[in-house]
Amino acid sequence: MLQSLLRFLLSTTAVLVITLPPIKTIALTATEVEAIAWQVSVLISPNLTAKGDRLLIPGSKTGSGVIIGRERNLNGDNYSNTYYVLTALHVVAKKGGFHAIAMPDGAVYYVEANPMSDRIIPLGKFVGELGQTIEGLDLAILKFVSDRDYAVAPIATTPPNPGEPIFINGWPNPLNLGNIQRDRLFNSGNLRQIVNPPQADGGYSFLYTNETESGMSGGPIFNGDGELIGIHGRGRGIENRCSSPEMNLNHSCGMPIFPLLPQIAAQKISLPLNQNPVSIEIIQYGLRYRGQSDRIQGDRWPLTVLGTVINPNFDATLALPNPETSINSTSVNAANNDSGNPMNAAANAQKSSPVYYVNPQTGTNHATAGKTPETPVKSISYLLQSSLLPGTVINLAPGIYNSSNETFPFKLPTGVILQGNMPESGNQNQDNREAIREVLIVGGDFTTTRSWGQQNVTIVASDRSQISGVTVSNPLRNGTGIWVETGNPIIRDNIFSKNNREGIFIGDNASPAIANNQFIDNISNGISISNEAGGEIHGNIFKNSEFGVVIAGNAAPFFTQNQFDGHRIGLILTEQAHPKLNSNIIENNREYGVLSLSAADPEIASNNQIRGNPLSNKLAVKNHEWGLPLPAELSPSLVFGCLEYDAGLATWVSNGNTSIPQPMILWPPELLQPTNRCQSVAGKLNGIVAQVENPLDNLFLKTGRVNNSLVVCWVSDWQSNCQANNMLFPLQINQERINRIQRLRDLLVFPIAQQGNPVQQLEEEAIAPLQFLSERLQSPPGLWFVKP
């Protein structure tokens, strides 16, 4: 494909030399792509009547764009930059006034909307009597000058293939155009079709599944490596003139970036593009300061009042190409001149940063060791005694890293990379998993954490550190594999297995990227998340633990494309947690798929597949919302209520935030007034537990007769009988000689338990002790960090 692209480009009048980036083995996560996207995306407000009056005009639509080039202008000891913004031609089609460009740091620049202006470069033109079609590309380039440094979008050198993931960033218009506020939108999808040749009307050829809105026209399209591959231009609709009506109906469309290059050369435009690999610096910076340009207020942007600079300490040239790296009508020579290119220096930072090698079998802990694979050190902890710089890589040879040679926990300094066997394809197939298992880190010890006191941990991940290609296991009591309480570490392509408590704990305000890992056979949880933590958890497999993930506190992580199965419960959300769940598969867990407790408020998209979880696929248990009046003297923890269960209703019991609610009595739909029955019984039970010490340990459900009717009542011992004052509900049996044991078993939802149904025969009656429920409501170890 790349050879075809080169032949296509070299067939123009331009002489173009492209430096090919190193082949990447792992695509970025959506969070990492967004970290690039917000730094290079702009909002365009067209056709203002004057500079500096306001950015957004009530009733007017806006568009989006992306920074694709920068040219350094030197004037003695001073310098300025000429920036090039790519957008859709139809965004800036109208003439007159000014186009305002809002940058990621809040500064606004103006381009005169004049057909004669050299600050607007159209790459197509409107034709037809009404100008209803575009000959050429529906693209335009805007130029402006600034003394500030901004990142430039890295441009892909290889066209994408249908089926690949893509990402779009832009600034949608609100439904009410009188609103002068804009919120940035970034979303993911897949490239479904590439029309070849592109449509004559505007050069459209990409069709994709991403949800787009008016106002995102001109916004960038990125591939999975964070590189610019196109510009969005049209939303879904039968008449969007991109492909067949069927494809148009369900797909937005955009223009690839690659035809832009010969167009620029043909117009003899000198445009410094960034075709270097994505640098780790731009990703790390974007993760750290993510969201600072997410909202624009349109009445607060006069030219003389600039917003806060993105980061006064951030050298934006690390993310920018050298001005000599340009596509020119005569020559492009920067590909042969890497020495003066700061972007290349940044992209190759890992190459120039220290790289150390560790081998537990052949290594020697000596000051001169570790510089080559042939002369490794013996232990990771030996290296960590030194002051390691950000970007330092620690390469681990296959072997077992345990307490015989190591001192735990490993505390990774800022930006340090711990790397074992990495999958070649970015996917963990069987061969890759076996390779990752060959690098086994086993053990742990106590360390003082920020918010949770002393904890037994294997690895402490700091800001911007990276961990990949290893298997982590902490089998010690209450052992955690990786502890994250700060910054934006990246944890991907690992295996977490047989950790005594959880694979990863995320707390405080940490916002890690956790991708393509496997969490298998951990004793309590795959991941635990609390406090104000966030981050993205993407493409992981959670299997065969007590709970897949537990989220508490005010945590708001984003879960996408993960798989949960084989747990007691897939996900537990409690306290004020408000995660987002998108495109996950949560199936075949023993009890619940997603269990929401307390005041948890998850955002669960319809594209999640939650199925085959016997007790409930999605259950929200909020005691204060069960709709039942509770006695004033009732303990606020142990509460009975009515919730949906198995296409009907059931009486449930809960014992606070740290217990798992249990269904108790099933009220099938065919029962007369099941809702009234359920609420009546729950209300009676709430009254009983307020009067009985250790109620579940000292209560029984028993059949008997009251007023010659078969009933179920509560009793405090085996010998007590049903009376009018302890009756819970009638059995409603028409046949006199009914099997009371079977009837009570049919109503009680106890068979879900491994212990079996506790209903027993007592002479002619049936009786069921509730002590079993008491045991089931005990706080499990996986909720250790949740407040009772």
Image: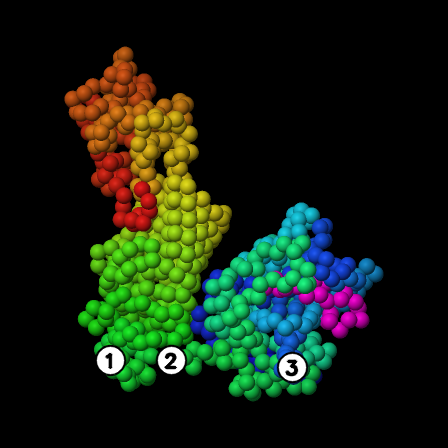
Q: Residue at x 65, y 81 (%)?
A: 74
| Residue highlighted by disc 3 | 74
Mark 1 residue type = Asn
Quadrant position of the N terminus in the picture: bottom right
Mark 3 residue type = Leu
User: What crowding class fits label 1: few (fewer than 14 Cα within 10 Å), some (14-19), or many (20 or more)?
Assistant: some
Q: Mark 2 or mark 1: which comes first in sequence?
A: 2
Which type of secondary structure does the marked residue at label 1 adopt? loop
| Residue highlighted by disc 2 | 354
Magenta-tinted stretch: 99-122
Q: Residue at x 70, y 57 (%)?
A: 54
Label number found at residue 365: 1
Answer whether residue 544 is visible to the viewer in this image. Answer: no
Tell me the CA gap for discs 2 and 1.
Answer: 17 Å
Which type of secondary structure does the marked residue at label 3 adopt? strand
Q: Residue at x 33, y 31 (%)?
A: 640
Horizontal side of residue 448 vs 648, given as left or right: left
Write down the quadrant of residue 96 in the picture: bottom right
Eye-nearest disc, 2 or 3? 3
Q: Are marks 1 and 3 in contact (CB under 8 Å)?
A: no
Answer whether residue 52 is visible to the viewer in this image. Answer: yes
Magenta residue check for 111: yes
Quadrant position of the C terminus in the picture: top left
Label number found at residue 10: none
Horizontal side of residue 631 vs 133, given as left or right: left
Horizontal side of residue 87 vs 688, given as left or right: right
Tell me the CA gap for discs 1 and 3.
Answer: 51 Å
Which type of secondary structure does the marked residue at label 2 adopt? loop
Q: Nearer the viewer, residue 611 or 339?
A: 339
